[in-house]
Structures are given as structure tokens and as C-alpha cells.
């Protein structure tokens, strides 16, 4: 596939022979572009950026720009590593790492919709979907198979657990546990039951997660008490993942149960 004659390519860039580099693309540093990649018009890659195979970077996206961090000069070294078969739509911004030997990472099979921002040192797992104009601050960690609603904002140094989902236009500064529905402001509204089914979890696995959720959020125990109670019970792998995530929370802790969710009747099943 062609490199358009208007593209500006750094001499140290390594571009696979079948990559498609569109009009006015600018590659300013020693980037590595894998086989089958497509960079659409006006995309910019700057600094040390590595892109795996079959990834598509959209119109006007900027990957590898310096972090928005006053302690680091624009020429501070840092990497962006993007995996295979991901789609990064128009006007997305992904900033380089600020940590020594670290990288801002985007895994495989992710879909970042238009206007998504990933701050420095963000870590995305695989099969993550981020809807339009979501903003992730530095060092946010997003596990695999998370769905982030449009317009959501995330404080730096927080985590989103596997198979969680967030309601659009919500804001978070606390960790969102796996399998839950994040909503409004630092709250969870329940379990991501549709996502659990789509991920192939059977009824027994979903029930185990539901019981873990009830112990943490609906038993009347505080977080420390619920974790202590969980130690006395036998759980499956997913519920153990749920409690391990909560146990690893830092000072800001995890999202609280949305107040209106406390009075919602139990669903007939999961």
C-alpha cells in the first residue's frame, strides 16, 4: 500500500511494506508501524511510538505527544505502545509516558471513538471500547473488556476493573470494581449483567459475582468488614478477582453504591 507523497516521515521511522500512510500524515520520530496498519489524513505520530499490526489511526489523531504535566519538559523521553487490530478514531490524543522505562499502553482489539484522550502512562487492556470524548488522566488503568460511555472523565491514578461499564457523562476519582456499572459521580449502580452474559459467563458464575457484590455493597458492612467476611467464604475465580481488586484499592478507595440503587428490588436473575 502507498505512502502518500504529502506525508512527512522521519528517516528513522520503520514502516511495514503494506502499511497505508495517508495524505499529510506526520511521523516526527523513530516510530514503528506494523503490517496492515492504516494512518488516515493528518494523523500525527511523534516520539517513540510502536504500533502493532492491523491497527487503524484516524483523521487528525495525535499519538505520542508530550504529557500535559508541568514537571516534564516537552522533550522528556517516553513511549506509546499500541497493540494489534485496534481502531483509534479521528482526533484522539494519546500522550507519551513520564515514567523511566515505562510506556502508555493500548492493548489489542480496542476501539477508541472520536475525541478520546489517554493521558500519560494510561494502561488499556484488550477489547476495550471507549465512546466519544471520554478523558482519562495520567496513570489510569483499564482492564480488559471494559466499556466506557461517552463524555466520561477519570481522575489520574485510578483503576477500572474487568468487564465494568460506565454510564455516559459520568465522573470518577475512585476505583470501579470489576463487573459493575459505574454511574453519575463515583458511584456504581449495579452489575453489568448484559456484559457478563456477552462475555460467556454462565449462570453459576454470574450468581457468584452477584453474591460478592451483595456482600460488599448491600450487607450493611463497611469495606474492611466485608473483605474480612469474604475471607471466611468459598468463592469462584471471578468473585475472588472482585474482592482482590477491592483489597488492592489505594487511599481514594472504590466507588460507593448509588443511593437510589439501595432501594431497587432484586432482579429475578443474573
Image: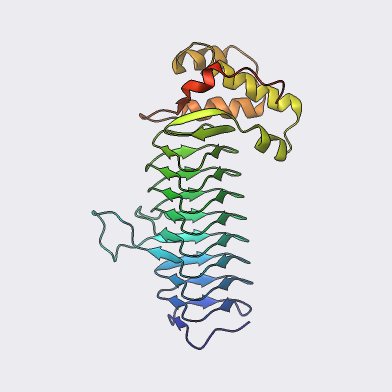
Q: Is residue 72 above or below residue 22?
A: above
Q: On the image, which quarter does residue 111 sit in?
A: bottom right
Q: Which residue is at 62% across, 55% downward?
A: 109
Q: On the image, which quarter does residue 205 sit in?
A: top right
Residue 146: horizontal and vertical position, in percent? Answer: 57, 43
Q: Which residue is at 58% across, 64% downward?
A: 52
Q: Is residue 180 above or below residue 260?
A: below
Residue 198 as seen in the image, left or right of residue 81: right
Q: Which residue is at 42% across, 37% downward?
A: 172
Q: Is residue 137 above or below residue 41?
A: above
Residue 216: horizontal and vertical position, in percent? Answer: 53, 19
Residue 194 as seen in the image, left or right of residue 259: right
Quadrant of image for the C terminus: top right
Q: Which residue is at 33% across, 58% downward?
A: 67
Residue 214: horizontal and vertical position, in percent? Answer: 58, 18
Residue 79: horizontal and vertical position, in percent? Answer: 42, 61
Quadrant of image for the N terminus: bottom right
What coloring was used for the rendering? Answer: rainbow
> Number of labelled discs?
0
Residue 136 visible in the snapshot: yes
Residue 178 visible in the snapshot: no
In this orientation, which residue lies closer to the viewer: 201 or 188?
188
In this orientation, which residue lies closer to the viewer: 82 or 131?
131
Residue 233 as seen in the image, left or right of residue 270: left
Amino acid at each position: 500500500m502507498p505512502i502518500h507523497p504529502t506525508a512527512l516521515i522521519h528517516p528513522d521511522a520503520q514502516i511495514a511494506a503494506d502499511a497505508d500512510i495517508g495524505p499529510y500524515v506526520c511521523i516526527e520520530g523513530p516510530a514503528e508501524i506494523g503490517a496492515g496498519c492504516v494512518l488516515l489524513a493528518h494523523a500525527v505520530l511523534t516520539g517513540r511510538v510502536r504500533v502493532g499490526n492491523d491497527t487503524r489511526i484516524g483523521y487528525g489523531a495525535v499519538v505520542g505527544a508530550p504529557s500535559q504535566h508541568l514537571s516534564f519538559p516537552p522533550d522528556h523521553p517516553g513511549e506509546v505502545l499500541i497493540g494489534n487490530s485496534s481502531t483509534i478514531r479521528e482526533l484522539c490524543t494519546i500522550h507519551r509516558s513520564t515514567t523511566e522505562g515505562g510506556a502508555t499502553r493500548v492493548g489489542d482489539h480496542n476501539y477508541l471513538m472520536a475525541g478520546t484522550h489517554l493521558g500519560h502512562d494510561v494502561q488499556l487492556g484488550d477489547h476495550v471500547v471507549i465512546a466519544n470524548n471520554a478523558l482519562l488522566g495520567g496513570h489510569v488503568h483499564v482492564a480488559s473488556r471494559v466499556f466506557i460511555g461517552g463524555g466520561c472523565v477519570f481522575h489520574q491514578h485510578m483503576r477500572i476493573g474487568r468487564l465494568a461499564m460506565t454510564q455516559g457523562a459520568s465522573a470518577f476519582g475512585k476505583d470501579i470494581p470489576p463487573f459493575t456499572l459505574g454511574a453519575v459521580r463515583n458511584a456504581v449502580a449495579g452489575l453489568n449483567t448484559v456484559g457478563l452474559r456477552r462475555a460467556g459467563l454462565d449462570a453459576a458464575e454470574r450468581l457468584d459475582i452477584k453474591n460478592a457484590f451483595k456482600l460488599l455493597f448491600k450487607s450493611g458492612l463497611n469495606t474492611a468488614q466485608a473483605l474480612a467476611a469474604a475471607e471466611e467464604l468459598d468463592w469462584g475465580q471471578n468473585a475472588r478477582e472482585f474482592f482482590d481488586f477491592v483489597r488492592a484499592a489505594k487511599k481514594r478507595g472504590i466507588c460507593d453504591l448509588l443511593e437510589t440503587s439501595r432501594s431497587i428490588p432484586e432482579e429475578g436473575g443474573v
